[in-house]
Structure formats: C-alpha cells, structure tokens
Amino acid sequence: MLALLVFGLAVLFFSPAGASGGPDVPGGPMAPSISPAITGTLGANGWYVTNVTVNWIVQPLPLSSTGCDARTFVTDTPSTRLTCSATFPGDVEITTTITIRRDATPPVAAPAPARAPDANGWYNHPLPVAFSGSDATSGIGACSQTTYSGPDSGNASVGGSCSDRAGNQSAASAVFKYDATAPLITMFAIRARKRSAELHWRSSPDTSSVELVRSPGKKGAAQTLVFAGAATSRLDTGLRPGRTYHYQLTGTDEAGNKVTRALDFLARGALLNPGPGERVSRPPLLIWSPVKGASYYNVVLVRVRRVYSAWPVRSRLQLPRAWVYHGRHHRLRPGLYRWFVWPGFGRLSAGRYGRMVGGSTFVVSR
C-alpha cells in the first residue's frame, strides 16, 4: 500500500523483567496518535479558497492503517469527510475524521436597480442600486448597495460587489442613463391681438416638448390644452375682452423632467395697448387693430371731457406728456383716461370716417 504517512520515531524502552509496559513519560513508550496536516489558504467560515492537501501524522508506527493516504483537492466541494484509522500494538485503535470545504470560485454578481427607468429609458431622480449574487458552493455571504444621484450622463454607472461565505468576492456595475436636471424656459411672452393672444417662448435645447394650458378654458371648461408639441409660438383665439386668462407653459425633456412658467393676460378687443384699466406711470403707446383700407385714424382722449385728438396714419400713437388742445395747455396727469379710435378713408380733409374701432381706458398713476 502506497501511503504518505508521517511517522514519529518510536523509541521503545523496556521495563525491568516481568514488566509489560509503562506510562507515556520521558524515556517511556510514545502514546499512539493521529493528526491531520493541512496545507492551503483558509478563507472565511472554515472554507479553503485554494487547492488543499491533507497529510496524516500517525505515530508511532502502526500495525495497520486505513484511509491515511495523502489527498489533494483541486475542485470545489461543499463538504468532504476524510477518515484515518490505525491499529497500534496492544490492540489500540484510533480513528480521526475531518471535513474539508473548498470554494475557490468567486460568486456571480449582478446589479438590481430599485425601479424601472422613469421616462424613455432615463432615470430622473436618485436611483438605489442593490447588488445580488449567486454562488454554487458556499453560498452568498453579502452584497453591497448604493444610491446614484449624479452627475447627469447618458452613460452613468455605479459599481458594487458580492462576496460568498468563503470570502471570495466579485465586482459588478450598472450602466444607465441619468438626468435629474429640468430644462429651462428662457422666455415666455404674450402679445395682445384682437380677441386673441399671441404667445411666444424659448426653451433650452434639451426640451423635447411643451404644453400650453389656458384657464378658464373653452366652452365653460376650467382649463383647455391650447398646444402640445415642439413649436415656439401659438395664437390663442376666441378670448373675451376684459377677461383675465392664466396661461401655464410646461417644458419636458426626454428624461421626463419638467419646468413651468406662467403668465396672466387681460384679453383685449380692437384696442390692444394699454389693456383695459391698465395702470401706467408714463405716457403710453396706444396700439389698436388696423382696419383694412383705412388711410388714417382719429384718436380721441377724454378725461372728464375731450382733452386730446390726433390723426396718425398708422395703427399706433405715442401720447405726449404735454400738449395744446383748442388753445389750452394740457399735461398727462394722474387719473382715469378714456380713449377712442375711428378709421378714416380717403383724404383727411374729406372727413370720411368709418365705424368706431373701439374704446378703452387706462389709469395714470401718481
């Protein structure tokens, strides 16, 4: 039998004649024993993480032995029992058993994001990522977890790891698209039109779409979606002069982030600026809707009584701060003013006027 046995030197001392043996004392017989000699790298929890070789130390020289050959483990094993038995002089039998557990294979690790992408394959707020794993031999001991909160990137990544019960470790990473920054609306303005509003806006390049909502809405609705898409302007018609409308513009990027701007607008009739009852602190620019075929217009300003009249050829007039009307000097003083516009046709001297364009008011503040 080929066996790798490590024997101690057995030195036998004989007692005086008639003695049959003696205790294990210096100079006396060696007590029989079996012990394993294990070489290999020990990991965690009693697991070996490299090849393992087991030799047996049997002493003194036995009469016979079983299972005491050397053995080397080069593959993983969850639990292998090794038993070495030996018989010594005097019918002494000893048996020693050990268990070898080898796991030199790292676990398989994989990321597990806490949720699906928020919009169009993008995440738009902090993302918890837990890592999970599997291990065929010793089993998973622990896996890491983390939370990603930036920076924004179309190729964001976060790393983690899992370790098995033997102490082997594997790294893994999650790659995803992340954008938690809302787009920008850099301009939102309204230009008055007759019974309508011309809305204009500008937004940052990452804005994929906008929605424009008006309240009160159409046909008695609380609100109406006026526009949805990628344009930069919209004409909203069918407004009631003198009513205030609230416009809310919402921009959305591909990741689902939103930005909102809002404006209130006082609807006008044919007289566009100033708005009805608008307060001004300086002479206003009067603007009205042009009339087809008109050669000029007659603009009349009233403060209790008529105090000003002019005949501009365009559908606008800048009021002066001071003027003379029918020989009397006037200034634009604080208070309520009414103004009216008529279209004129042909030569001014002909005095041929059409139906009044409209009338409105403004208030000069102190």
Image (spheres, rainbow, N blue to C red):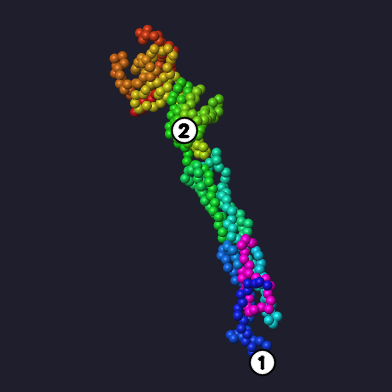
State the image coordinates of residue 88 (x, y, percent, origin top left): 67, 79
Q: Earlier in the sequence, mark 2 or mark 1?
A: 1
Amino acid type of the residue that numbered disc 2 sits on in the rendered structure = Ala
Q: Is residue 312 left or right of residue 144?
A: left
Q: Quadrant of the C terminus?
A: top left
How packed mark 2 is, by other alpha carbons closer than 10 Å (few <14, some 14-19, many 20 or more), is some
Residue at mark 1: 17
Amino acid type of the residue that numbered disc 1 sits on in the rendered structure = Ala
Quarter of the figure with residue 57? bottom right
Q: Is residue 326 magenta?
A: no
State the image coordinates of residue 17 (x, y, percent, origin top left): 66, 92
Quarter of the figure with residue 185? top left
**SS type, badge 2:** strand
Tell me which residue sits at (55%, 40%) in the image: 121
Residue at mark 2: 262
Q: Decide if residue 138 is in sight here.
A: yes
Query: Disc 2 versus disc 1: distance between alpha carbons?
Result: 118 Å
Task: Look at the picture and state if 180 lies above or below 37.
Answer: above
Q: Start and end of the magenta stretch?
A: 54-78
Q: Quadrant of the N terminus?
A: bottom right
